[in-house]
Amino acid sequence: MANIPVYAGSSSFFPGDTAFGFYDYQYDFQVDADAVVTFVTRRLGWPIEVVELQPIQIYTAFEEAVTVYGNEVYQFQIRENMLSMEGNPTGSGPFNQLLMTPSLGGMIRIASDYGEEAGVGGNVTWYSGAVRMHPGTQSYDLNIWAQQSASLAPGDYMEVKRVFFEAPPAAMRYFDPYVGIGYSYEGLLNSFGFGAYSPAITFLLMPLFFDLQRIQAIELNDQIRKAAFSFEIINNQLKIFPVPLVGYNLWIQYVKGSERDSVVGGRNSSGSAQTNLITNSSNVPYINPNYNYINSIGRMWVYQYTLALCREILGYVRGKYSTVPIPGSEVTLNQQDLLTDARSTKEALLLQLRETLSEVGRQKQLEKQAANAENLNKTLANVPMGFYIF
């Protein structure tokens, strides 16, 4: 087996020495790469102890540490802002250096699904159509009507939202003794579309409560003495009360089941589903961080994580042989100590970073501002108030 060289006390970084080359051409990364090699090897015991690593392994660990740091930071940003990011174009990034401003778009999009059932919002189109009523026919199968008139695709279904079937307004049967006395009110109000309804003329001469009482009397008379205008609809089977005596068009509003049940949102003006939108954490446009922009706090975390990774690599290397024979004895290597320390350090560093990110998150900052404002008010309450003499 060839005699593979180990760390000899110096290193010289060149682009291409890392595994992926994410940061090889970033100036600060190039400068820090060899300094990190010195830091890691000295912490591992060199020059008193031999460090069975090569600089390229430390460069690769350095690259991994920077990437892990960026992943943790950007994963937190995604969790913090996903509701606002969702639905934005994936080409609107990268988001690394952009300020994320919360918006109500995501919450409104969720709330609109409830409004759509009430006909006051949502993404489902309400269609309208006319069902022909026939004299003497009381029941109508809207499923058959939908197949013939509603342009439903095979396997689709409709859900009726509203039926425009109401009794004629009381105003149409309002008797006005003041009409036709020569004041030309009817001709005057015809231009506003009121001339066909008697109350539109009468209110010019009588108190408003007079009109209201008469309309209520007409409606109560219809409810007691006449067949009520109503309908029932069960499983799209429409029954009209009373039985139609003449033919006319009855208008309804409905939605298509395929559109209401669709889970695909973000449609364009033509109704087609938009693509290239942020739909989950995997396609939020964050890229690897720019090492030049990482501050000293972040870089120290990267150095410590690099050391933990190198300690782990060295543990695996030394685990090739648990003991090494020497003249008259043998040396036991510290593989298990290196692996245990490396894993605990990595876990502690990740926990520390996540706690820091949580503390600077939007919710925590708002809580701190509220607490500061409350404490400030308590402090100011103890300040003596002055007296002003005028």
Image (cartoon, helix red, strand yellow):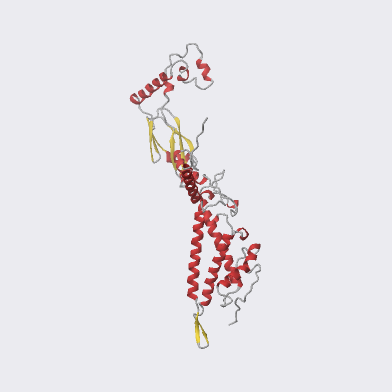
Above or below: residue 302 compared with residue 91? below
Image label count:
0
Residue 93: % across, % down: 60, 53
State left or right for residue 33 relative to residue 184. Answer: right
| Residue 262 seen in render | no
Above or below: residue 329 compared with residue 171? below
- Quarter holding residue 34: bottom right
Q: Residue at x 50, y 41 (%)?
A: 125
State left or right for residue 165 relative to residue 65. Answer: left
Q: Residue furthest bottom?
A: 328
Q: Residue furthest top?
A: 182
| Residue 361 seen in render | yes
Q: Residue at x 53, y 17 (%)?
A: 188
Residue 18: % across, % down: 61, 68
State left or right for residue 52 relative to residue 197. Answer: right
Could you say which is closer to the camera, residue 221 or residue 86? Answer: 86
Q: In which quadrant of the rendered image does the N terminus lie? A: bottom right
